[in-house]
């Protein structure tokens, strides 16, 4: 027996080494693997709790490290005016984002969270950021190259604060000047709004040649994921009443309010946000025909669909009157990530219950999570999850980057 002990010991050591190697190498962490392989490998490892966590976006004020770890939160946002400190520096923003990110990376699978913020005319929530004219002012320039440069500058300033995702651009077509958010619309003419979707190229970068239709694209650490909003018809409500009903035929919707989404998808927009408004009496947050059948299936959009702030709550009137129904209707319609933003345990508990009781099929959850992971992989979040200080000097920079011409430079100096 003694003469076989050494070979046996060697064999056992080789087995242990192989097992250890297999345990440390996972395909989803390998950037050399194809995108589809990485998504599939990670998906098969995820529990229901981890998947629903990815679908949950919460406000920074409730995004404690424990919340991030215990609920596997997929995304955090700053609501309007929600800042880590008054007159916060870029370094303060970065420290806050990284604290949350470290908590996400400490979970079993280490899936990075994605931090989002409004940046609809520059990085407008942040002290000393460059503020650009609102869309209504930019639309009159008829200059898509200008808005592309504004997108480039905005991306740099957002990244300067450690944030990789913006809820912009607004591509509403304002059909009634009584609408209080007309300033967020480039024009009442959908052709001008379509031209101005070039800002997406500035924010995200230009699509590579031979890109597949609808697949999201973000060109590295100096760019951000964009969000075309608010899908669809938000600028066409009756009498311009905000968040109200857009009464228009199918051909009218396609001809006026939908075209800019065609352009946005063609430019590889990463995410699309649903509108508070309704189309012919049907709430957009609960409109399966337009969100799943048309946007995802017909237009081949492969990024993720995100709700607006408490968008699920507003499916009912009054809001939050029947939250369980709202979760079923919103997620069932095809919303992938839910901007909760505060009472996230209620959302998670309701959605978990509905999946376990076959009210919402697991296939719907898997579709949502695949889309969220696709965007995160494309952005390079798995390779570069932590923000750094390399771009802090870009915040409020007055230096025009690139080959700006005087007539189209988006900054104050050329």
Image (tube, rainbow, N blue to C red):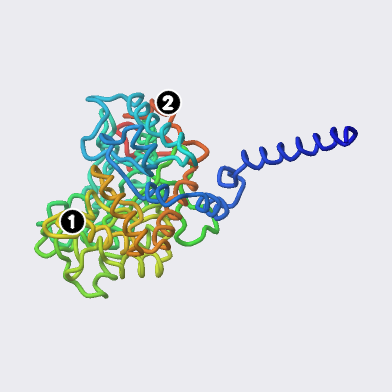
* Label whose residue precedes the other's in the sequence (1 or 2): 1
Q: Could you tell me how far apart the alpha carbons at marks 1 and 2 are, in whole angstroms? A: 39 Å
Residue in view at x 34 percent, y 46 percent: 146
Q: Residues within 10 Å of mark 2 (few under 14, many from 20)?
A: some
Q: Who is closer to the viewer here, 147 or 342?
A: 342
70 is higher (above) or lower (below) than 142: above
Q: Position of residue 365 (x, y in %)?
A: 40, 58
Disc 1: which residue: 314
Element at badge 1?
Answer: helix
Q: Position of residue 318 (x, y in %)?
A: 11, 57
To which quarter of the image does residue 303 belong? bottom left
Q: Which mark is residue 160?
A: none
Q: Position of residue 139 (x, y in %)?
A: 25, 52
The reply to whether residue 397 is visible in this rendering is: no
Residue in view at x 9 percent, y 57 percent: 178
Q: Which mark is residue 389?
A: 2
Q: Who is closer to the viewer here, 358 or 74?
A: 358
Q: Position of residue 64 (x, y in %)?
A: 32, 33
Q: Who is closer to the viewer here, 314 or 78?
A: 314
């Amino acid at each position: 027996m003694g003469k076989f002990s050494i070979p046996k010991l060697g064999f056992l050591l080789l087995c242990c080494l192989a097992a250890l190697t297999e345990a440390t190498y996972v395909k989803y962490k390998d950037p050399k693997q194809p995108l589809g392989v990485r998504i599939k490998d990670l998906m098969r490892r995820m529990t229901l709790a981890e998947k629903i966590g990815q679908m949950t976006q919460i406000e920074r004020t409730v995004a404690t490290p424990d919340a991030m770890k215990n609920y596997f939160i997929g995304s955090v946002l700053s609501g309007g005016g929600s800042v880590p400190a008054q007159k916060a520096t870029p370094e303060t923003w970065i420290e806050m984002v990284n604290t949350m990110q470290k908590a996400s990376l400490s979970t079993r699978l280490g899936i990075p969270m994605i931090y989002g913020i409004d940046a609809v005319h520059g990085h407008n929530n942040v002290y000393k950021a460059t503020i650009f004219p609102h869309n209504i002012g930019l639309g009159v320039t008829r200059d898509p190259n200008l808005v592309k440069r504004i997108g480039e500058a905005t991306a740099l300033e957002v990244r300067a604060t450690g944030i990789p995702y913006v809820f912009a651009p607004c591509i509403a077509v304002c059909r009634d000047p009584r609408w209080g958010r007309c300033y967020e619309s480039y024009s009442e003419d959908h052709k001008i709004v379509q031209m101005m979707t070039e800002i997406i190229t500035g924010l995200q970068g230009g699509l590579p040649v031979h890109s597949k239709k609808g697949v999201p694209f973000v060109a590295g650490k100096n760019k951000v994921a964009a969000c075309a909003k608010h899908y669809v018809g938000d600028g066409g409500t009756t009498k311009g009443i905000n968040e109200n009903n857009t009464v228009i035929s199918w051909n009218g919707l396609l001809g006026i309010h939908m075209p800019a989404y065609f352009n946005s998808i063609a430019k590889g927009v990463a995410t699309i946000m649903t509108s508070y408004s309704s189309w012919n009496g049907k709430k957009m947050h609960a409109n399966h025909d337009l969100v799943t059948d048309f946007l995802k299936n017909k237009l081949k959009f492969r990024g993720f669909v995100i709700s607006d702030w408490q968008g699920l709550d507003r499916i009912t009137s009054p809001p939050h009157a029947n939250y369980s129904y709202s979760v079923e209707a919103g997620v069932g319609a095809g919303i992938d990530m839910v901007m909760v933003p505060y009472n996230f345990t209620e959302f998670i508990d309701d959605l978990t219950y509905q999946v376990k009781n076959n009210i919402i099929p697991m296939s719907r959850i898997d579709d949502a999570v695949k889309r969220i992971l696709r965007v995160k992989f494309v952005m390079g979040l798995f390779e570069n999850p932590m923000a750094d200080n390399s771009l802090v000097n870009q915040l409020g920079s007055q230096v025009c980057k690139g080959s700006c011409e005087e007539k189209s430079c988006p900054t104050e100096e050329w």
